[in-house]
Image: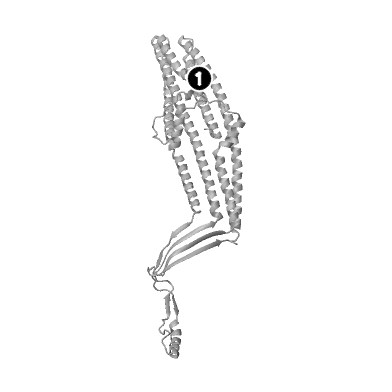
Amino acid sequence: MVTKLRIGYLLVLLLTIIPQVSPAQSADAPSAILNAYIQEGLQSNLALKQESLEISRVTESITQAKALFYPRLTFNPTYSLAAGGRRLQFPVGDLLNPVYATLNQLAGSDRFPTNIPNVNELLAPNNFHDTKLSVQYAVFNTDIQYNYLIQKDLLSAQEARKRVVENELRYTIATAYYQYLQTLDAFRIYDNNRAVLHELGRLNEKLVANNVATKDVVTSTRYEISKIDQQLAVADKNRQSAKAYFNFLLNRDLTADIQVDSLLTRTLPPAPPALGELQQTALQSRQELKQLGGSLRASQNAIKMNEASLKLPNVYVGGNAGFQGFGYTFSNQAYVVGQVGLSWDLFKGYEKRSKVQQAKIQTELVQTKLTEVEKQIQLQVLQAYYELDAANESLNATQTGLANAEQTFRLVDSKYRNGQALLVEYLRFQNDRLTAQIQQVLTRYDVLLKRAALDRVTAIQ
């Protein structure tokens, strides 16, 4: 019976070890499953959708700025009714009628009218309409020209910002996936160790039944199993939380199943390029710099716009064509008016000079921020590079520690079954092996997380 129990124990032990030594895929082969999840997140994530809407909004601003280059045609009919108010009064009849009557007497005819009424008109026209088409075209307007360029620069900055969010989302999804797989491995380790303790408990019950050991070995084993059960409950809670967070990032149902890439859990990323090369790659690829570059160009164009507005006038042409008069008769009411205009602010309380200076300050501010971000990126790459290096060293140490813990535990297990070791020794080295297994899983996933962080700061996809 002891032999059968020992064989069962060895099978459980092999199940614990096998995941660490199974063949792995090529180190530089991407995970198709993880990449599919990343693409799903890029398509459905709500934060990224907001950035897409912002791009659409800025694109409409460009359309509006471009529309100012075209002529403006307006149909503008008005009709006025008036009553009361100020009046225009002039005694034309009182002045001219006596004069014309005298002239008629002298001439002996009725040649001149003698019933001219006095002028008594409302200043506000009554029953008056002005039905016209108006056209206006800016021949030369620097504000329109530079505003269009500024809106294009802002669109470039907004598109770069969206790519920044995409890069962050890729990193967040990858780390969330690694953390979920990590909880699965932790749960598996605890479950396997629980099976080992169950085999130990059955062995101890047989030893007690055969009067080889006292009953305390059974109760001690049960106590260790209860501790493992508690750790399993915590591991299961962590697994459910990690699953919900990952599904949240993909805008899916929080309880949706997640496909596990079993090969990825045993794959170490390839060694990164040299630090200097990574820093240059980051300076060329990071979208934060392109976003600030768009803002810098917009500020520079704002300087040019305000300087041109300070020195140059705006020229426009336009005209009106339509009907105007009392009552909608349209008879003898047609008119056409053409216009050529020039607008030039010769003095405006130094407002435009202040705007030029303000735009220069904004440009200098963005340039300073750009320089700062460049240095920050170089620092981020350096830190991520050495953190990955430290994680690899730690992984090597934990792998060595796990191998030693496994070997020691097998020796103690053999001694215990042959009555040459105490239960307290067995449980101590069993806990050491459990700790080594958990530590090895943590450091293995830490390498994957640190590599994802390095890819993030270098914007490598």
Q: Quadrant of the N terminus?
A: top left
Q: Where on the picture, by quarter, is residue 384?
A: top right
Colour mapping: one colour
Answer few, some or many: residues within 10 Å of disc 1's Cα (few below 14, many 20 plus, some between 14 and 19).
Answer: some
> Can residue 181 be seen by looking at this rendering?
yes
Q: Nearer the viewer, residue 179 or 164?
A: 164
The residue where tag 1 is placed is 432
Q: Is residue 445 above or below residue 304?
A: above
Query: Would you identify the image quadrant in which residue 293 lies?
Result: top right
Question: Could you tell me residue 298's position as x and y percent?
Answer: 56, 48
Q: Is residue 287 left or right of residue 193?
A: right
Q: Residue 266, image x and y in percent? A: 49, 23
Q: Amino acid at mark 1?
A: Asp
Q: Nearer the viewer, residue 32 or 275?
A: 32
User: Residue 234: percent from the left, percent from the top?
Assistant: 43, 28
Which residue occupies 54% across, 23% down? 395
Left or right side of 345 for 248: left
Q: Secondary structure at mark 1?
A: helix
Q: Residue at x 51, y 28 (%)?
A: 448
Whole-percent x and y of residue 290? 56, 41
Residue 180 visible? The answer is no
- Tell me: residue 190, above or below residue 459: above
Q: Nearer the viewer, residue 162 or 448?
A: 162
Number of marks in the rendered image? 1
Q: Where is 336 relative to 94, above or below?
A: above
